[in-house]
Amino acid sequence: MNSPVGAGNPVAIHDSLIHVTDSVIELDLSVPWEPPEPPAPRRRLQARWVAAAAVLAVTLGVLVAGGPLPDGGRLYTVQVQVLEAQLAGGRLIIARYQPTAPGPMIEARRASDGALLWEHSTDLQQTAVAGPDVVLLLTESSTGDGVSNGLVVLDAATGKELWSRPRIGFQGTNAAVVVVEEVRSTTPTIITGLPDQDPGVNYARTTPERRFLGLAARTGTVVWDVTIPEGRDVDLGWASPYQSRLVSFDELSPTGQLTRRDARTGAVTETRQLDWSGRSAMLGSGWLDGSGRVRDRLVVYPAGERGADVYDLATGGKLFRWAGDGGGTSLFRCTERIFCANDGTGLTAVDITTGKPRWHLDGPGMVAGFAGERLLVGTFAQMNAIQPTLTGIVDSRTGTVVRKLADWRVLGTGGSRPLVWRPVDERTAILGELDPATGTVAVFATAGNWFGDPACSVDGRFLACLVGGELSVWRLPNRR
């Protein structure tokens, strides 16, 4: 059941609002950075006050170097056993624990001040996906036929239930529709291999007939309906690895015909005939993010074979065979000129036309962000880390490390100037915006009660981060 709060008299959460004036400092990352030492105290301080003074010194250094940001800083915190949170459309959608109900309480709050707009009590364990106009509540169930989702859609402005649909496979959303897959008695299964089998061999998925639907976000009516025949492989393209925004999907037939569709309309936007036939274990255009990128290559991983074939979509011809590393890794597009792969010892770049190696970088095995010709490289240093730890900025043309980064971690929000954080002590972190072109971080806030990796969401000028059940919201400085 949902309880909307009148727009003229919103319920303010005064006990959880913390107003903080933060400022900005530009940090040169060519050398390891450490917080400056606080002024020598006149008397001996307890250890916890020494740590607090160190954080204060960071903030004071910000004021001197960068000047104040009147419209930046932390706006408030929500301390109500928060399970997850997302920003969208000027609202903060929260799922929090209910001790008297099996499912979470879903809340909508105004992003700017945390005022409660409405709440919706659930009887099932549900995951919320927030959009500008609607909120999707997903339940997951597992049967002998596989895993399926139940979908309930709420009006983002009022919390009113608009429509629901059982037994579907949620695939993503976009500005036009919610994309789902019809769950049938036989669902696609990914076979990753058995312990006694070679991990370097591409193991195929079963590829039964699949039916995808584009449902109108506010009504649930079918906008488009596409059936993929049996034996064809499908690759879904998202705008960002950090979002559920589905922009396109590709279909490859056993005879090599590639059909590309717009996920907003379901319409065919492109067809190509590749010089290939057989069974695909996996395919993709290579990009980790699929919005606004040049998609002139297709990478096909033939079932039962090693490595991948790379095709030029302009001609349909095969450009080269990538042998792989024997460990089951895949190619991904780093820039318009190179593919990258993690070979177990580090990052290797190959030419997108010839497949010839361009450079190899020992150590970091992943690309955490793209910014023109600069790559943000890093690694998952901690086993249970949610976001990667950055190790450096690399010139993608040469493989040269142009800046070394020490202990900065990605907030997982994407963007050409990524948001990052760094621990100061066991309870405190500093937050900033990284400029890949210069290697500097503009620190805009300090965060307390920061006990581990955060789960963060960004929408326009607002950033929300959840750590240990406590949610904090900041207004970001003007982003370029």
Image (cartoon, rainbow, N blue to C red):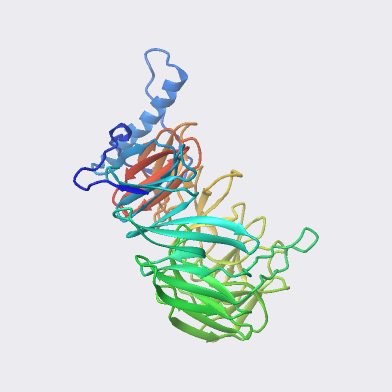
Q: Residue at x 59, y 52 (%)?
A: 364
User: Which residue: 37% across, 22% down?
Assistant: 39
| Image-based side of 303 in relation to 271, left or right | right
Instruction: Give how far across and how far down residue 296 sits, in percent.
Output: 50, 78
Q: Position of residue 26 (x, y in %)?
A: 36, 44
Residue 105 sits above or below residue 176 on the image: above
Using the image, determine if residue 232 lies above or below residue 239.
below
Residue 7 lies, with reference to residue 200, above or below; the image says above
Q: Note whether 201 is above or below 390 in the view shown.
A: below
Image point 46% across, 57% down: which residue? 242
Q: Quadrant of residue 344?
A: bottom right
Q: Is residue 11 left or right of residue 295?
A: left
Q: Nearer the viewer, residue 48 or 249?
A: 249
Q: Nearer the viewer, residue 280 or 137?
A: 137
Q: Is residue 397 left or right of residue 462?
A: right
x, y (%) of residue 227?
Answer: 53, 79
Extreme residue in the left direction: 8
Can residue 476 be seen?
no
Q: Farthest residue in the right direction?
A: 196
Residue 321, image quadrant: bottom right
Which of the pair 433/263 is nearer the observer? 263
Task: For residue 392, say whether it is visible.
Answer: yes
Instruction: Assign the C terminus to one quadrant of the image.
Output: bottom left
Q: For this view, does 114 lie left or right of residue 150? A: left
Percent of width and height locating residue 83:
46, 43
Most extreme residue toward the top is 43
